[in-house]
Image (cartoon, rainbow, N blue to C red):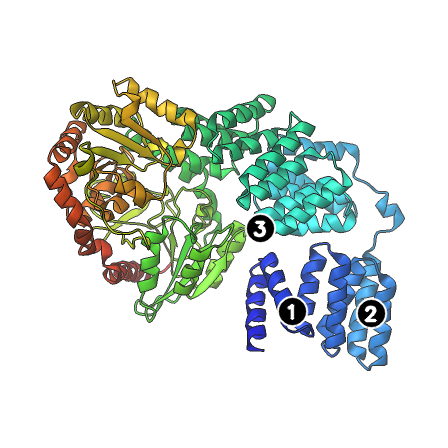
Amino acid sequence: MNNTNSLYDEAILHHRAGRLDVAENLYRAVLTLNANHADAHHNLGVIEFQSQRIESGLNHLRRAVDLAPKLDGYWVSLADSLLTAELFDEAQLIVEQLRKIGQKQTAKKISDRIKKFSNQMPKQEEINQLVPYKSKKKVEDLFKQSQFFEAESFARHLVEQYPKDSFSWKALGTILFKRRLFEDALEVLLKAINLNADDAELLNNLGNVLQQLNRPNEALFCYRRSLEINSDYAIVHSSIATTLSSLGLKDEAIDSHRRALALDPNSVDSLSALGTVLKEKGHLDEALKYLRKSLELNPKYAEGYNNLGTVLQELGEIDEAIFAYKRAFQLNTDLTVGYSNLLFALNYHPDKSAEEIFTEYKNFDKEVGNKGQSFWLKHANTPDPHRCLRIGYVSPDFRSHSTRYFLEPLLAHHDQSDIEITAYAELKAEDEVTAHYRQHVDHWVSTLGLSDASLTKKIREDGIDILVDLAGQTADNRLTVFARRPAPIAVSWLGYGYTTGLSAIDYFLTDEVMTPIGSEHLFAERPWRIAVPSMVYRPAMNVGNLNSLPALESGTVTFGTLTRGIRINHHVIRVWSAILNCLPASRLMIQSGTFTTQSMQNSIIEKFSAYGIAPERLDIGCRSPAADVLRDTDITLDCFPHNSGTTLIESIYMGVPFITLTSRPSVGRIGSMILHGAGHAEWIAHTEEEYIEKAVDLASDLPRLATIRANLRNQLEASPWRDEAGFARRVEQAYREMWRIWCANPT
């Protein structure tokens, strides 16, 4: 029985969080153990009915009232479902049955519902009162022109004028979806479905909303129902592909996209979506072909320009990527992901100054951030400088992601008597690492699909004192929520390495190496410096022991990097080539996800060939895990002006020293911060020439290099990088000081 109760309690948690597929499986497990569990029958029936499995859902709801006839809520659920299914006679029978068993109050409640529902049923003349063609055309034209605010306003007018016509609701819901207001879109599209359940396009649109709300099984049901109505509806195959891709089934997704294009070769959505999945599989040249074709067909396709930018970025064409991102945002100012991608790409630009780059961040604040100011409200948090602080961490990376090596030790060591933690998780899927995070926080809030307004309201209701952004301008960030200032204090840390650009965020948690005194003008936030390093590191488990220096056996020094291709620009290639030319017997290994395909490998080989580096001296590919690559590496070479991150600290942990070039604050000083924290500032260069000299010098003394390899892990273990409790205290002290400042002048 205890096991049954435990399963049921877990099912309820998943149900409330909107993870219906997980909840459904758990309810079924409960019923396997106890076939007479009324609550499980009721809740499973609700889920099945919502998923359009009408008969099965009704059977579970009927079984629930049989098992618990005194619970009037179960009778009401059954009656409401019968009315929705238009089984009016059975609904009326419930009223009579309840009267017979003496539950007159519940009978009256259901009888009133039947009358109300009957009054709401459209008359035949209302059904025939369809939205005029001109009105349909107007809202469709506004939608196609990405004039979503105007389209929404007109669609709302249609809803008021023609409330019984499904087109009005479908149009409004689709526009809300495009504006990423997924909760609102779901509510509206469900109204449309109640009016017309046999509209293939409507079912596809509803599936798209459910997909964004992380309800893939329900989305797939809608898509397949849509294909039952119209088997030649091409775009549904692409919708199915998007869902399959989110489930990690990339090859199946590509097949579905190709089926869509076989039916409609000129579908810009399908072309762009196929290009995106091909990019994720590393087929960049083919991805480029499909994305460019989508834009030839529709030069005003904002999402297409954004998707094109992501491929160009991977190809190292940063200027072209920046142009594509700018065009995406120009065409659709609601597409803030395009602006985020633009800022992300700018960080890697090899030739722009820090001041030029920050100018674009300031523009982001004007174009996007300032829109949040109209939602600023006075905070009701009690300004007591000594009380327990409520800290909220916002991230899309509470999962198997490199962030865990730095974030998990902080959360694990927070002082629970002084800090109450809420995780706001923008997660498409949870994994085993998510379970670890859940153990370290007091409250867990799934934010996927929550509109900015809903999430802002939730954070305020939770009474968060300090809200911490862990994503910056990376994918799936919630910076537009931070722009609304839902908490008295906002801090950015860890996930991005540079300013968010938002003046609505108060502090950038950093140190004096990453963000030296005098660089404040390059940040929208106030840099709050703690002792170096402004991070802590917990190595992955089971990486294994250190090995001896590979060069001692091979007689050849192997330089290596695990970085993505976007960091390897013409300056980096020139400097690395100079090192290899100084050491003719040396070789260079570049391993990362960018170089999974032969075309990408050939591209980087050609760039090195221009400096006289023969292909046989290069080992380009995508080997993993990182620890095994590092075992074959003698010296790691860092990139610039945007340094690597996680792979550098992993390199140190595996006994492999690295050379870094200090550059722009703060993304160009990550390597310097790591080395200062590890006690090896001597490997930091300040010019390209010094970088070459340090690399050649280190490679020219193999006995010294072997000694470094043998001792480096122990040195890291003894450094501040591995002082998890001490780091947590430093961060908490920073939070407390920030809080005292606010308490002195609460707003």
The answer to whether residue 353 is seen in the rendering is yes
From the image, tell me which residue sits under label 1: 32
Instruction: Single out the mark in the foreground, 3 or 2.
Output: 3
In the rendered image, the vertical position of residue 106 relative to residue 680, given as above or below: below
In the rendered image, the vertical position of residue 72 relative to residue 51, given as above or below: below
Observer-nearest of 161 and 502: 502
Task: State the CA–CA distance, disc 1 to disc 3.
Answer: 29 Å
The residue under label 3 is which amino acid type?
Leu
Give residue 176's position: percent from left, percent from top: 62, 44
Q: Are marks 3 and 2 in contact (CB under 8 Å)?
A: no
Q: Which image quarter: residue 226?
A: top right
From the image, tell me which residue sits under label 3: 213
Task: State the CA–CA distance, disc 3 to disc 2.
Answer: 35 Å
Task: Tell me the SS state at disc 2.
Answer: helix
From the image, tell me which residue sits under label 2: 111
Give residue 112's position: percent from left, percent from top: 81, 68
Give residue 720's position: percent from left, percent from top: 20, 55
Residue appearing at x 66%, y 66% in the figure = 43
Between discs 1 and 3, the one toward the N terminus: 1
The residue under label 2 is which amino acid type?
Ser
The residue under label 1 is which amino acid type?
Thr
On-image quarter of the C terminus: bottom left
On-image quarter of the N terminus: bottom right
Give residue 706's position: percent from left, percent from top: 14, 42
Task: Tell me the SS state at disc 1.
Answer: helix
Q: Which image quarter: residue 698?
A: top left
Between discs 3 and 2, the one toward the N terminus: 2
Task: Tell me the SS state at disc 3.
Answer: loop
